Amino acid sequence: MSGDLLHILRSVGLDEKQAALYLAGLQLQSAPASEYAKATQLNRITAYHTLEELVRRGMCTIVKKRRAKWYGPVAPEKLAVEARKNVDALQRVLPELKSLQGTKHLRPDVLFYEGWEGIRRVYEDTFTAKSELLNFANSAVVRRYWPNYDEEYVTERVQHGIHLRGIAPDDAAGRKVHGEDRKRLREIRLVPAKDFDFTNEINIYDHKVAICSFGSPQHMFGVIIESREVAETQRQIFEMAWRYAGGHERKP
């Protein structure tokens, strides 16, 4: 008996005993359970119960002879038809099955980039944003490592029509950048530098959170997390900070 045939029959929903009995039946045609048991080396009771399962599943038929039950397999073509029906049924309910999976159970995609070139790649990904960028940043830090940041990154962001809302430390660099908001397609709110001296940058957009760390030239890295749940949580945290920053700016 071919192991390949057994494997294929098991792949369409038959267990090992059922597959063995079905293949034996193709050779025996119509026979009592005892003949099936002998052909498959199963004990007679196991063969009988398994053949009854195949009958219930429509894969075997019963013919009564001399007050005994004889079993016969259905044509192989019928198995192929049933297998196609199962595949078609699965395809129909696939969207519903995927919806049951839920985003919170999906493993997020995390992309890690090392070095300055890696950080540049993280910034370039923000140009794919279909929503506004929500940004925590230290205006001085990125420009220290990227002197042409405004001419290169900010200009291209504006060309893509991507609006930015940002929170930055209230220092000389932050105030200078804040003063150019209108022409740079952004709105920045400043927070006390002594309390919030960010050393990395976070961008939240669409279903992504991008983090750039500028610890030192030897330890720069960037991370992009693709997860709707993570992005939505970070978006809510930003909105909470945005309200605080608005209150700070209104103080005399």
Image: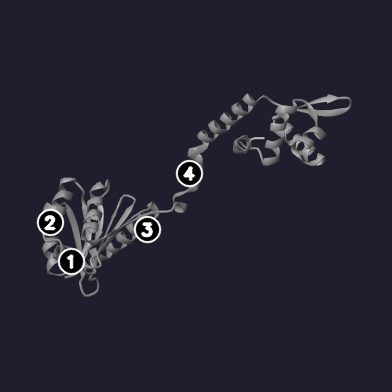
Q: Find residue 99 and name its label.
A: 4
Q: Earlier in the sequence, mark 3 or mark 4?
A: 4
- Residue count near mark 4 (Cα–Cα under 10 Å), binned few <14, some 14–19, many ≥20: few
Vertical placement of residue 190 versus 122, above or below: below
The disc, 4 or 1, on the residue closer to the chain's N-terminal end is 4
Q: In the rendered image, which residue does mark 2 sit on?
A: 150
Distance between the alpha carbons at the discs numbered 3 and 4 = 21 Å
Q: CA distance from mark 2 to mark 1?
A: 13 Å
Between tags 3 and 4, which lies in front?
4
State how far apart marks 4 and 1 are (Cα): 43 Å
Task: Identify the residue at the far front of this view.
Answer: 1
| Numbered badge on residue 141 | 1
Which residue is disc 3 drawn over?
233
Residue at the (17%, 64%) spot, across then down? 139
Determine which quarter of the picture holds residue 193: bottom left
Q: Amino acid at mark 3?
A: Thr
Q: Position of residue 35 (x, y in %)?
A: 80, 32
